[in-house]
């Protein structure tokens, strides 16, 4: 495997843009990943070194993992937006979604990191999941932060303590398909299968 070349990466990804992220942020992220792969062999190997089976959830492991990825600090401070950590109170949506893909054993996830217990995963929380979870009474925090993600995961664990994050896909589809939007629509509420447990159905 050839070494990561920052100059070449800038050329290859010139003009890249996704929401707030541009070429500099992407190159910094790739440089952090390349450094971790060079030092540890793979991202999975690094995560395994950070993992503690006796911890309640994945939060402390994720914090250690991000610390390694972000050390030394990326050249572009904006890259920190991509490498969020529970230590800052962030919900860490992207990282928790990545962990869902890598850890959960059933479709649509890959289940490659078999050393991690799926019961320790935390819900990938964004503004849409936060809103829908609030409607369903799964959480009451006003901010979509780490505490909110942890609280929602705890409530879902009452249904499946071994794999609480299994419900992520079902909840996020309501937002992706715009069936449960901030501007609630009666025609959607009338046909929603979760209407009977929703705290705010449109009548």
Image (spheres, rainbow, N blue to C red):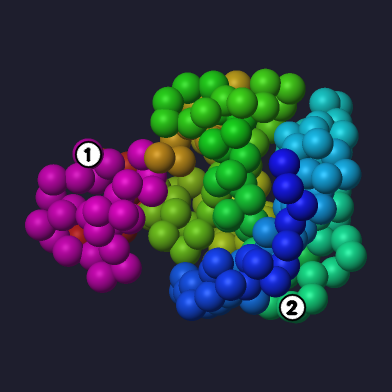
What residue do we see at 64% from left, 36% from top? Answer: 121
Q: Is residue 182 visible?
A: yes
Please state if 189 lies on the left or on the right of 81 as rendered.
left
Residue 36 drawn at (x, y percent): 81, 48
Q: Which residue is mark 2?
A: 76
Of residue 117 and residue 141, the one placed in the foreground of this image is: 117
Q: Look at the numbered disc 2 and give the secondary structure of its residue.
A: loop
The stretch drawn in magenta includes residue 74: no
Q: Where residue 69 appears, x then y in whole percent? A: 80, 55
Q: Is residue 181 magenta?
A: yes
Dot 1 alpha-carbon crowd within 10 angstroms: few under 14, some 14 to 19, many 20 or more: few
What residue sits 60% from the left and 21% below the top? 162
Closer-to-camera residue (174/83) = 83
Residue 117 in sight here: no
Instruction: Report how far apart the C-alphas of labels 2 and 1 lie in the structure.
Output: 45 Å
Image label count:
2
Stretch of the chain drawn in magenta: 170-195
Quarter that holds the N terminus:
top right
**Residue placed under numbered mark 1 in the picture:** 193
Q: Is residue 37 above or below residue 10?
A: above
Work out whether residue 171 or residue 21 is closer to the camera in this orientation and state it: 21
Residue 86 to residue 80: above or below: above
Residue 48, image quadrant: top right
């Amino acid at each position: 495997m050839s070494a990561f070349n920052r100059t070449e990466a800038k050329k290859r990804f010139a003009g890249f843009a996704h929401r707030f992220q541009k070429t500099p942020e992407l190159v910094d992220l790739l440089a952090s990943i390349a450094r971790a792969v060079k030092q540890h062999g793979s991202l999975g190997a690094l995560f395994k070194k950070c993992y503690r089976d006796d911890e309640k959830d994945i939060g402390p492991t994720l914090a250690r993992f991000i610390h390694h990825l972000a050390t030394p600090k990326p050249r572009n401070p904006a890259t920190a937006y991509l490498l969020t950590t529970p230590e800052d109170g962030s919900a860490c949506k992207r990282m928790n979604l990545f962990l869902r893909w890598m850890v959960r054993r059933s479709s649509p996830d890959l289940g490659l990191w078999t050393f991690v217990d799926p019961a320790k995963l935390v819900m990938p929380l964004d503004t849409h999941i936060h809103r829908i979870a609030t409607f369903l009474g799964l959480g009451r925090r006003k901010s979509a932060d780490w505490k909110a993600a942890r609280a929602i995961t705890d409530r879902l664990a009452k249904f499946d303590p071994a794999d609480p994050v299994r419900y992520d896909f079902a909840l996020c589809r309501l937002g992706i398909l715009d069936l449960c939007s901030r501007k609630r629509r009666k025609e959607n509420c009338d046909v929603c299968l979760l209407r009977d447990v929703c705290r705010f159905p449109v009548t």
